[in-house]
Amino acid sequence: MGTGRDFRRSKTITNSVVVRVNNMNEIWKPIRGFEGVYEVSSKGRVRALQDANHGGFKAGRILKPNVHQNGYLAVGLYRSGKHYDARMVHSVVLEAFKGPRPPKNVSRHMDGVRQNNCIENLEWGTSAQNAEDAKRHGTFVLGEKNGYAKLKSEDVRKIRELKANGVVYTALGRMFNIHWSTAWCIIKGKTWRHLT
């Protein structure tokens, strides 16, 4: 990691935006909406160019990101002592280096590691592409591994068995404490498709 002084090493102008390059081939660009206050690097680091929250830290200080409950890195950005919000580092990197989020797009971590925010690892893409990435990385949660699942695999197998024996959807719902439409989705293959 470089020191806080790395941002002074060299400076180039690109499209009227100051782009700074340090000796680690780390490119720094302004954060959209916080120009002149914060910069983000091609390596996924965020730094303050001035004391934006009156906390007394030095200009050029690299911010320490927090790990959000979803596993992504986030930083709190301030201007004039007012806290704006926690911003996901991957979104800030993508906005600075690839432009604003296109409509109906999400950020994608190409290697599946949520804390790898190097620009080479990030892309804008559709939710479907992101889901395919998660399947490829093995990070896609199915069935009872999903934190919101009310059923276990054995419950789903039992629902299918009971339905094959003529039990109606409303009765299945009562038996497993689910809505009848949940049982219908299981039988029709809309949910729990991975389980045979």
Image (cartoon, rainbow, N blue to C red):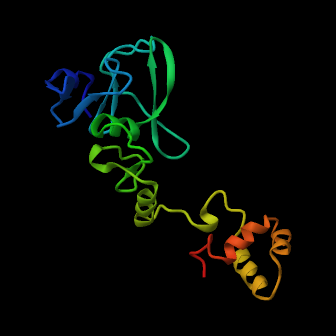
Q: How many marks?
A: 0
Classify 6 as above or below 174: above
Classify 162 as above or below 78: below
Expressed as whole percent of the image width and height from the top left, the position of residue 194 reads 56, 75
**Residue lying furthest front:** 103
Work out which quarter of the rendered image holds the C terminus and state it: bottom right
Expressed as whole percent of the image width and height from the top left, the position of residue 186 reads 68, 73
Work out which quarter of the rendered image holds the N terminus and state it: top left
What residue sits 52% from the left and 40% below the top? 68
Expressed as whole percent of the image width and height from the top left, the position of residue 13 reads 15, 24
**Residue toward you, 94 or 5:** 94
Based on the displayed image, in which of its 4 quarters is residue 162 positioned?
Answer: bottom right
**Residue toward you, 104 or 44:** 104
Based on the displayed image, in which of its 4 quarters is residue 190 positioned?
Answer: bottom right
83 with respect to 45 (left or right): right
Expressed as whole percent of the image width and height from the top left, the position of residue 74 reads 46, 35
What residue sits 21% from the left and 23% below the top? 18
49 with respect to 26 (left or right): right
What residue sits 31% from the left and 34% below the top? 96
